[in-house]
Image (cartoon, rainbow, N blue to C red):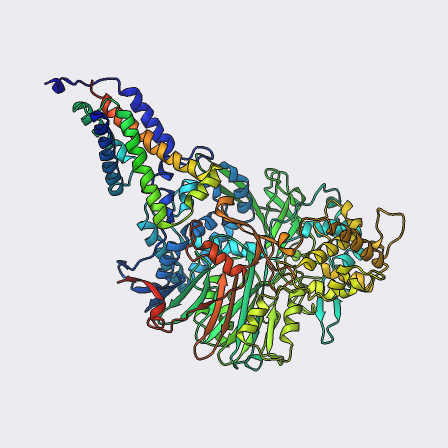
Amino acid sequence: MKKFFKEILMVFNLATLSIIVQLLFQDPWWLFIVVLMVLGVLSSVLNLSKKIFVVGFFAGAISWLIPTIYFRYTFGGNSFEVLSELTTLPVFIVYFLVAIVGGVLSGLALYVGAKMFS
Amino acid sequence: MNKMKKRISTGFIFPLLTLILMVLVLDRQIKEIPPAGKLFNPYIGVVQSEDNSMSDRTLGFAGSNFNVLFDNREVPHVFTSNASDMYFAQGYVTASQRLWQMDFTSYASVGRLSEVLGEDFLTYDRMQRRMGMMISSKETLEKMESDPETKEALDNYTAGVNAYIDELSYRTIPVEYKLLDYYPEAWSNLKTVAIMKYMSSTLSGYEEDASSTYMRAVLGDEHFKKLYPDFAYHNDSTGEFVVDNLLDSLPYAQEIDYSFIESSSIINPSEYNPRLGSNCWVIAPEKSATGNPILCNDPHLNLTLPSIWFEIQLSSDQSNTYGYAIPGVPGIIIGFNEHVAWGLTNGATDVKDWYKLKLKEDYKEYYLDDKWQPTKVNVEEIAIRGKDSFFDTIYRTDFGPVVMDNTFDLTPEVTNMSLRWTLHDASNEILTFIKLNKAQNYSDFIDAIQHYSCPVQNFHYADRNGEIAMIHQGKVFRKEIGEGKFIQDGTWSENLHSFIDNDALPQQKNPEEGYLYSANNNPFSNFSNGYVNGYYSDLRSSKIKSLLAQNKKFSIEDMKEMQLDNTNRLAELALPILLKEIKGSNDEILTKLQNWNYTYNTDSELALFFEKWWNEIAYLTWDELYVYSGLLHVPDNVVLLDFLENYPTDKYFDNLSTSDVENASDIIQTSFYNIREDFNDQEMVSWQDTNKIYLVHPSQIPALSKLDIKSDGHPEALNATSGNWGPSMRIIVELGDTPKAYGIYAGTQNGTPLSNTLDTRIADWKQGKYYELKYFKNESSYPEAVINKWTSK
């Protein structure tokens, strides 16, 4: 149970860090992946988690989904309705895709970093 | 200690390669799939494009001093102390609101879409290049830059646009760049000229030379003239329906063998809309309720999102002008200052002619004046995204480019012909608008419009001293009867036409009636200065005349009512003629039609019925013509009306599907009962079910457009809203001590299709609302209306 909460805490810490990095450095857009790889190395060195991909996935999903919802609410435009029409997917699927893309990239980045050292 | 024993492992290589591959895939567009990594990214992606919030800004452009005050409708009011800064600021501000639109139009105009959208657009690009859009843009730029005043405007406008582009990052580029995955290139004077040429092409591109040639060949001169006459419709003082066939018995001048076209399997329709037009009228002080002259204008153009128009005020030491600009072009196109107001309607005069050539097989020579002459050869490089460039060879003769040849025959009916189009001639329309913006009186107005060549426009003018004028301005070919209406002979240089002198073009100033108007009507009442043909429509103008001729003085409210008038002029003229023929029926709809006011409002059931009835009459009357593969359109509604009224036993009224011989009365009755029968069963019950309008995004992406908007109006009504075209903008200006103006267009100042105020603006436009155009005499005129301020020092 303690381990579980530790991993939850790690997810939120990583998500927060990822958000800060992406707010500060936007060019190139994939720079946060490099940062997460470095964190992956660190997590391996420190033996922080064995489910490093899952942790990274949820951190990445959160770091993309929550800001998306925030910006959409703040700006009040219709970009996701446009994407939904363009892709012929329901809007909630577009949100889901955002979370998946952010999650997979982050999870994989952390995993690669962690696997660099055995 | 355990941690220290970690060693580099090879287990990360495969996941790393997977990760790199994913980043590469998500970083670029693959086929139709946009780059999801960038697009979905909440910090720079599509969500960030929703942010069109405005704020005060201090800009640091060395050498450019200006203030831009944005009012509560986001209209920028630019204040500067000189023209250079004014055009710089206009370029900067316009780019900040409409960059993608102006950039895309410049690509589309000169055939460069393949460069950003890929090989699918190569045929379109080749067509544009072969029509001469790139060559003529370059030649026109050279002419424009030879004038110092125009060059100053162009250079500064371009610098302003580029100053904005330099500030952009992926996060801040317009959403269209993200969706189509490319980045804005640097602006140039050539791109501005390309936009001007695009507008010229849109307004003067329509022609039906091949179809007319075909129809003349199969029908013979007598029948052709009867069905497709050069006519003018007049609503004379008695209000009777009168058609002047201007060419009654005069023979066509040109005789070449047209047998080549009779075998054409099909004549391709023009891609241009012949109905693009406009309404404009001016009233002198004696017709105005306040004693001030009033100018009203509503250009009927393609309805696009973003709008063709951008509202702006431009003030410098030389002028203080308000109005509507075209994004990408310096100055204001339609507008007013403290002294004058001006408006435009499309002249609709034919300035695009085809010449049949005699060419050698390799296109290196053509036969002219009894000898072989070399053609000019241009090799155009068309860059293609992700592929090698395509090189297209275009041959040119004295008559213009050979658009279709043995390597490109999209419209085979004009293969091996040259296109003579006044758009190809180098001219300086921008100087017209630079001068109009600072005009103070009639002589300034005349000085300005003399630079205007293509497309032919009806320039309307009013000044605060009460003078009004209207001039049909542009380069108009001086032709013999019938020339230019048909394909011409390109083996004799004498068939190249000169132009009618400017002072011989139709023009009026301060008429006794106290008003002037145009609505794409035929302004030529005789051919003493040469024959002129065009794609005129006289019905709307006759409606304007009938309203302005009333014995009353007009207020701004009256003018609004006129612009929004949904009365179908055709119905007004035709229905009394039709109803006379329906006898002995007690049908309820007949009673309603007798009391109908001919308005095409959204909820009108009678408008829908009349529309169907008239179309059925046209269908049954012109059934003889449908066998011809080269038929582009049946004769004009006014011709049909003329036949119904004056030639009721003409052979065209005979219905080919029956053994009887029908006359006009039979056709009117048959069509009435055919429609009546269907009308009870149909699902569509009112005009709005048929009259749906489309505000289409230039990318043609439906998700970025507004489609199927139910609307009132009709092409033959002053409120000519129909399909994807109509009153793109409405403006009413009353000149007095301070100009008072009202206007609206469909769309928002900020061109983003993601705007949350777009639907409201479109609804306001559709409902016929007007906004007050706040003319700032100086920066402190409307302090309560200023929302944001941009300053450059």
Residue B706 location (% of width, % of height):
52, 50
Q: Is residue B160 above or below residue A111?
A: below
Q: Residue furthest toward the front?
A: A1
Residue B129 location (% of width, % of height):
53, 46
Indicate the quadrant containing the N terminus of chain B: top left, top right, bottom left or bottom right: top left
The number of numbered discs placed on residues in the rendered structure image is 0
Taking the image as shown, residue B279 lies to the left or right of residue A31, namely right
Q: Is residue B520 above or below residue B179?
A: below
Q: Residue at x 60, y 79 (%)?
A: B514
Q: Is residue B408 above or below residue B674?
A: above
Indicate the quadrant containing the C terminus of chain B: top left, top right, bottom left or bottom right: bottom left
Q: Residue at x 25, y 41 (%)?
A: A25
Viewer-closest of B704 and A96 = A96
Taking the image as shown, residue A64 lies to the left or right of residue B388, namely left
Residue A96 location (% of width, % of height):
39, 34
Q: Is residue B719 above or below residue B169?
A: below
Q: Residue at x 76, y 63 (%)?
A: B591
Q: Residue furthest toward the right?
A: B660
Taking the image as shown, residue A17 lies to the left or right of residue B632, namely left
Residue B696 location (% of width, % of height):
52, 49
Looking at the rendering, which quadrant does residue B641 occupy? bottom right
Q: Say if residue B376 shows up in the picture.
A: no
Taking the image as shown, residue A48 lies to the left or right of residue B347, namely left
Q: Say if residue B528 shows up in the picture.
A: yes
